[in-house]
């Protein structure tokens, strides 16, 4: 990368960070509007199904990383963006078909009024997945401004769907229908923004090659999403409709910390990959973890001091039961954010121990809630938070304590995340 590009990169990264921050803010307003419009019982069902949608959207994030890496390899060898886009569409359609076939089961499991809610969610998967691949094209081409527009449009169209839901008194199924329209509009915008970079390369990789890259590069990210997202689904499964809605609202404040500190974890990757030894890695990780803890502590303090106004603004008087849960949700989100730092650092060093730990913890968390600790929202949040604390401690113990040689593949991992500085 030229010196000019190096100087421009921080500015571009700042613009992308600001766009992601604005998108997260609009996402918060999206949830706040729907929580007030739907009420606790329906909002609990919406949140549980929406969390399932987040899990279905993981391939979209995976394709963004995989396609970005392919765009930056060998002087941006355009080795088959079209194939990658086709593969992403096939993956999205396959996930949609499976979800639609499972719609009656999901409806009964989450106690939804109609299976159409699941169908509309399923129809969103294909445009979201293809949009993820298009974001990868823009990221690989370092088109940060256009990528920022896609992030903002994604959030803005969903926010508009929430406004329509409030104005026209939508039910859960109608909300998902509106968000499907939002996903389709976002896809069209992404296609327009990336159309100039969609030149087929001299060698298009086979679909299986792209899928293999997809799986190998993103197992860790999927485990992190499972650990940090399944609690809302578990709460809907084991608690009453009203209690699951209160839990879902409180969980929002944990997600605020988790997503709001993601930029810290991202900056860890190139720093660790470039580190000359274990001492430097240790210092970087400790500073990053402390930054996350500081941000999380501010959010938790606010939740402890003014839970009433926060709940009133986020959901209204129907969610007063959520007030005591807010601080615990914020602390749990802080632990997830610390785990994110440890996990990304491990990926950059070619250390996959935390990947195994995160997946094991997600399974253990689910078993504990489903089988034993499910009598109240407090038992659920205590189980989820306790599991996160154990994983965070394991990650702390994995931080290098002395001078080490960078693990093979660390530079490739950093490149896969689109964060190398070379």
Image (cartoon, rainbow, N blue to C red):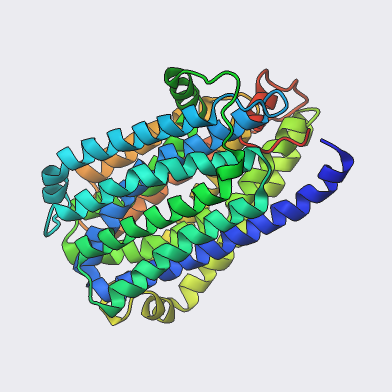
Write the residue at 35% across / 69% down. 162
Position of 146 relative to 77 (above/below): below
Pick the residue in front: 267 or 141.
141
Write the residue at 44% across / 24% down. 211
Q: Quadrant of the N terminus?
A: top right
Position of 16 relative to 4 (above/below): below
Position of 338 relative to 279 (above/below): below
Query: Residue 380 vs residue 228: left or right?
Result: left
Q: Quadrant of the C terminus?
A: top right
Position of 96 relative to 120 (above/below): above
Query: Residue 116 vs residue 143: left or right?
Result: left
Query: Residue 30 vs residue 144: left or right?
Result: left
x and y, in percent, of residue 396 in the image: 59, 38
Question: Can you see residue 8?
Answer: yes
Pick the residue in front: 138 or 166.
138
* Residue found at the far right of this picture: 3
x and y, in percent, of residue 288 in the image: 67, 48
Q: Residue 129 sits in which quadrant?
A: top left
Write the residue at 26% across / 59% down. 177
Q: How many marks?
A: 0
x and y, in percent, of residue 90 in the image: 35, 32
x and y, in percent, of residue 169 in the image: 23, 76
Pick the residue in front: 184 or 398.
184
Query: Residue 130 vs residue 56: left or right?
Result: right
Question: Can you see residue 396?
Answer: no
């Amino acid at each position: 990368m030229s010196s000019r590009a190096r100087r421009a990169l921080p500015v571009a990264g700042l613009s992308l960070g600001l766009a992601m921050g604005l998108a997260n803010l609009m996402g918060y307003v999206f949830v706040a509007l729907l929580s007030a419009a739907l009420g606790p019982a329906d909002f609990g069902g919406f949140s549980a199904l929406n969390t399932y949608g987040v899990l279905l959207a993981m391939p979209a994030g995976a394709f963004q990383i995989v396609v970005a890496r392919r765009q930056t390899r060998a002087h941006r060898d355009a080795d088959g963006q079209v194939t990658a886009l086709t593969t992403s569409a096939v993956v999205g359609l396959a996930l949609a078909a499976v979800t639609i076939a499972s719609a009656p089961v999901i409806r009964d499991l989450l106690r939804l009024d109609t299976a159409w809610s699941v169908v509309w969610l399923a129809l969103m998967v294909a445009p979201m997945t293809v949009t993820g691949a298009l974001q990868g094209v823009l990221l690989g081409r370092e088109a940060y401004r256009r990528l920022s527009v896609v992030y903002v449009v994604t959030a803005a169209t969903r926010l508009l769907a929430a406004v329509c839901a409030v104005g026209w008194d939508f039910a859960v199924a109608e909300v998902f229908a509106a968000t499907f329209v939002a996903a389709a509009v976002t896809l069209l915008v992404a296609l327009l923004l990336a159309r100039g970079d969609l030149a087929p390369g001299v060698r298009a990789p086979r679909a299986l090659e792209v899928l293999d890259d997809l799986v190998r590069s993103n197992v860790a990210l999927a485990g992190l999403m499972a650990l940090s997202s399944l609690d809302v689904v578990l709460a809907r499964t084991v608690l009453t409709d009203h209690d699951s809605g209160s839990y879902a609202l409180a969980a929002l404040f944990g997600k605020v910390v988790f997503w709001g500190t993601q930029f810290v974890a991202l900056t860890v990757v190139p720093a660790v990959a470039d580190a000359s030894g274990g001492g430097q890695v240790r210092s970087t990780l400790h500073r990053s973890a402390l930054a996350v803890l500081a941000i999380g502590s501010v959010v938790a303090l606010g939740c402890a001091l003014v839970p009433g106004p926060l709940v009133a603004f986020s959901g209204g008087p129907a969610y007063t039961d959520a007030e005591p849960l807010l601080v615990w949700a914020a602390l749990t989100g802080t632990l997830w954010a610390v785990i994110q730092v440890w996990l990304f650092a491990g990926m950059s060093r070619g250390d996959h121990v935390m990947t195994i730990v995160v997946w094991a913890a997600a399974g253990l968390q689910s078993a504990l809630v489903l089988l034993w600790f499910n009598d109240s929202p407090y038992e659920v949040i205590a189980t989820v938070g306790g599991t996160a604390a154990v994983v965070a401690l394991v990650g702390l113990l994995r931080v290098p304590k002395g001078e080490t040689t960078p693990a093979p593949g660390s530079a490739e991992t950093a490149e896969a995340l689109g964060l190398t500085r070379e």
